[in-house]
Image (tube, rainbow, N blue to C red):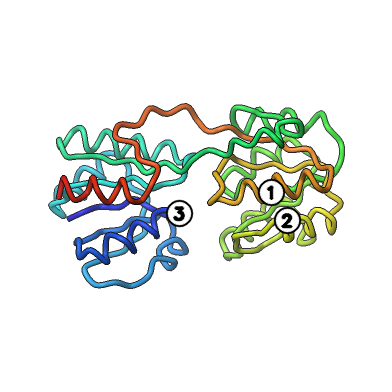
């Protein structure tokens, strides 16, 4: 049994390719919404639950997992750490699929890099102008507790719990952009026009995560970018292409 910790487009593509090869899979996502995006396939079980280290150890043991593939978001540090420690404890292989960073020198002039959400919020509190916040709802309170809420236009998933959180933090409906991506360069541009955006806040989610489309739109619109850099992580067995992952899986399973 292969256990894929997912919740990203990368993870869903890995599920598709591995299922096509007939591998038995268990797929984990953090939310019900993430689970709903995984296509139904034979020999593929999907569930949504956040598991800590001990719960992961129990789960892996109970399901006789032979390999764990970590295809979580680059910023899901805690999940990855728990997975690595669980695999080390049980002495089973761990593979990390890591999407490539966005590294385009054409946009370095408009990008202000910061290490973490708190640093981003502190920097933004000393700026002026409307902010397009595209870092999701999980850390939204870090920004709303530091910055004038009228400046924040938060782009978040259109689910009930997320919208309730936004309203609970004091965001007006007019400042909540509840939409499901991906977002093209043109769509980002139109949003920046509509909300008179001066600053974009994003993570380095890679090209597949839409970062380049945001940077292109910001460059065209003269919008500055606050880039929350990826956490410093040391992963064992890192792969950045699906073909390399597939080759490695065939060696192990």
Query: To which residue does mark 3 refer?
Result: 8
Residue 157 coordinates in the image, percent (x, y): 59, 60
Please tell me the numbered disc located at residue 188. 2
Query: Which of 77/18 is in front?
Result: 18
C-alpha gap between disc 2 and disc 1:
6 Å
- Residues under labels 3 and 2: Cα distance? 20 Å
- Residue 138 image point, x, y percent: 56, 47
Q: Residue at x 27, y 51 (%)?
A: 246
Give coordinates of residue 48: x percent, y percent: 36, 59
Residue, disc 1: 214
* Disc 2 packing (10 Å; few <14; some 14–19; many ≥20): many
Q: Secondary structure at mark 2?
A: helix
Q: Earlier in the sequence, mark 3 or mark 2?
A: 3
Looking at the rendering, which quadrant does residue 131 occupy? top right
Identify the residue at horizontal 81%, vertical 42% (top origin): 223
Circle 3 — which element? Answer: loop
Q: Position of residue 18 (x, y in %)?
A: 27, 60
Dots 3, 2 in contact, CB < 8 A? no
Q: Residue at x 56, y 61 (%)?
A: 161
């Amino acid at each position: 049994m292969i256990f894929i910790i997912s919740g990203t487009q990368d993870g869903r593509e890995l599920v598709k390719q591995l299922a096509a090869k007939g591998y038995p899979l268990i797929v984990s996502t953090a939310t019900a919404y993430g689970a709903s995006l995984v296509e139904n396939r034979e020999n593929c079980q999907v569930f949504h639950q956040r598991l800590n280290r001990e719960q992961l150890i129990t789960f892996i043991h109970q399901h006789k997992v032979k390999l764990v593939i970590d295809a979580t978001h680059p910023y899901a540090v805690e999940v990855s750490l728990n997975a690595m420690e669980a695999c080390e404890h049980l002495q089973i292989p761990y593979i990390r699929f890591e999407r490539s960073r966005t590294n385009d020198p054409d946009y370095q002039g408009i990008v202000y890099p910061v290490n973490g959400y708190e640093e981003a919020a502190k920097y933004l509190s000393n700026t002026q102008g409307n902010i397009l916040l595209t870092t999701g709802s999980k850390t939204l309170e870090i920004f709303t507790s530091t910055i004038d809420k009228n400046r924040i236009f938060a782009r978040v998933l259109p689910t009930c719990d997320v919208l309730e959180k936004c309203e609970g933090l004091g965001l007006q409906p007019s400042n909540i952009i509840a939409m499901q991506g991906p977002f093209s360069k043109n769509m980002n541009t139109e949003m920046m026009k509509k909300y008179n955006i001066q600053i974009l806040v994003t993570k380095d989610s890679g090209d597949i995560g839409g970062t380049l489309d945001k940077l292109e739109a910001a460059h065209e619109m003269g919008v500055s970018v606050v880039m929350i850099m990826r956490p410093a992580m040391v992963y064992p067995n890192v792969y950045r292409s699906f073909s390399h992952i597939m080759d490695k899986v065939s060696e192990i399973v």
